[in-house]
């Protein structure tokens, strides 16, 4: 009888200690991808089973409405809308989303990104582009019901975004200007996953248009090499800003693409020839008529 009790006690003790492990495991962060149609841009929805954070929110209110449905279907509170950088394909949906989720805080890694967003929107309004996206018009004396960028976007000024209920997103916004003046990446331990934002494009042409100088492209290439060495051991899954998830070989693919782009745009005799040659090298890449077109236009006379 004595010998029987012992295993039962051991088993009970195991169950007791195992319980916290089980509840911790339920807090592991998971991610869902919302693939936008316009510009093939991704939104990422992080969940720990108790709350949600969405990273980047699409290029149009129409797509943000679809994203809203996906988030609402999860039936968990959305606490943060994280915008990685000041390009409208990543933030246009924020005005709609914040109306749908009034408790969710719009956050950026630092003040510089907040400035980039307001700067881009102010420019878009000045050239009339926001007539199609009136929700994004900045609040002003002539537009008192506009979006209040200053008070509605919060700079985290931290490298960590803690999720309500456990788990953290590790932010890094300490990069030289590349695809954008300031970019944020996110690493999640639970997933061994790196969310590169627009350092990464997968089977989608890279944006090297307005605002992306030769020096920015060189910084971008150098950063891809840094990612390569930093992550050569841990081999995280790579979630790009545009296109499907990949592995770390994506960094090599991107470096080769940049080298091809630099070579072709400096040797082709016309913009049309450069576009033709890039399309011939990358026949399956998306957004040739948008991202590639304006990138070639920006780097050739
Ligand atoms: Zn983008």
Image (cartoon, rainbow, N blue to C red):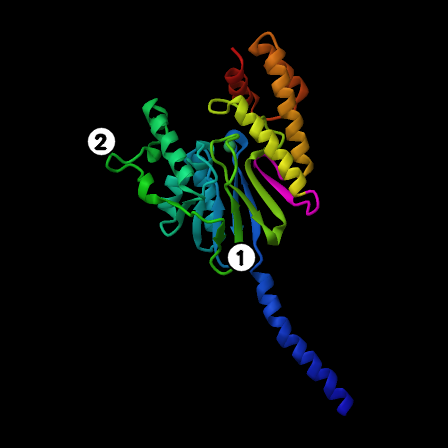
Q: Residue at x 32, y 24 (%)?
A: 126
> Please, is residue 218 above or below residue 301 in the view?
below
Question: Looking at the picture, does residue 220 appear above or below residue 27?
Answer: above
Q: Quadrant of the N terminus?
A: bottom right
Q: CA distance from mark 1 to mark 2?
A: 43 Å
Residue positioned 36% across, 26% down in the render:
123
Give the image location of residue 238, x and y in percent: 62, 41
Secondary structure at badge 1 equals loop
Q: Which residue position is annotated with label 1?
A: 167
| Numbered disc in front, either 1 or 2 | 1
Question: Is residue 247 at least partly visible in the picture?
Answer: no
| Residue that badge 2 annotates | 142
Q: Is residue 164 visible?
A: yes
Q: Tell which circle, 1 or 2, labels the residue nearer the N-terminal end.
A: 2
- What is the magenta range? 232-245
Front residue (pair 99, 274): 274
Residue 207 percent location from the top left of the image: 53, 26
Q: Is residue 277 above or below residue 286?
A: above
Left/right placement of residue 57 relative to residue 148 reads right
Nearer to me, 17 or 130: 17
Q: Secondary structure at mark 2?
A: loop
- Which residue occupies the foreground of this view, 210 or 43? 210
Instruction: Tell me the quarter of the picture where residue 118 sits.
Output: top left
For residue 8: magenta? Answer: no
* Left or right for 126, reference 225: left
């Amino acid at each position: 009888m004595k010998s029987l009790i012992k295993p039962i006690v051991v088993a009970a003790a195991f169950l007791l200690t195992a319980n916290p492990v089980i509840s911790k495991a339920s807090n592991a962060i998971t991610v869902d991808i919302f693939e936008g149609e316009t510009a093939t841009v991704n939104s990422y929805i992080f969940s720990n089973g108790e709350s949600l954070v969405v990273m980047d929110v699409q290029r149009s209110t129409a797509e943000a409405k679809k994203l809203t449905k996906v988030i609402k279907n999860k039936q968990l509170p959305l606490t943060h809308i994280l915008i990685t950088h000041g390009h409208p394909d990543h933030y246009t949906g924020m005005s709609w989303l914040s109306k749908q989720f009034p408790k969710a805080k719009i956050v950026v890694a630092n003040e510089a990104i907040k400035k980039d967003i307001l700067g881009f929107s102010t420019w878009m309004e000045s050239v009339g582009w926001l007539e199609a996206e009136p929700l994004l018009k900045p609040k002003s004396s002539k537009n008192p019901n506009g979006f209040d960028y200053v008070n509605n976007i919060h700079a985290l000024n931290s490298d960590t975004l803690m999720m309500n209920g456990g788990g953290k997103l590790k932010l890094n916004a300490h990069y030289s200007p590349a695809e954008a003046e300031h970019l944020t990446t996110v690493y999640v331990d639970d997933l061994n996953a790196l969310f590169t934002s627009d350092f990464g494009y997968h089977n989608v042409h890279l944006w090297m248009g307005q605002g992306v100088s030769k020096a920015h492209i060189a910084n971008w290439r150098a950063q891809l090499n840094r990612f390569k060495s930093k992550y050569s051991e841990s081999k995280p899954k790579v979630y790009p800003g545009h296109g499907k998830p990949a592995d770390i070989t994506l960094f090599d693919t991107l470096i080769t693409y940049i080298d091809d782009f630099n070579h072709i745009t400096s040797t082709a005799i016309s913009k049309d020839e450069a576009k033709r040659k890039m399309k011939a090298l990358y026949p399956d890449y998306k957004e040739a008529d948008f991202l590639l077109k304006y990138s070639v236009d920006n780097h050739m006379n």
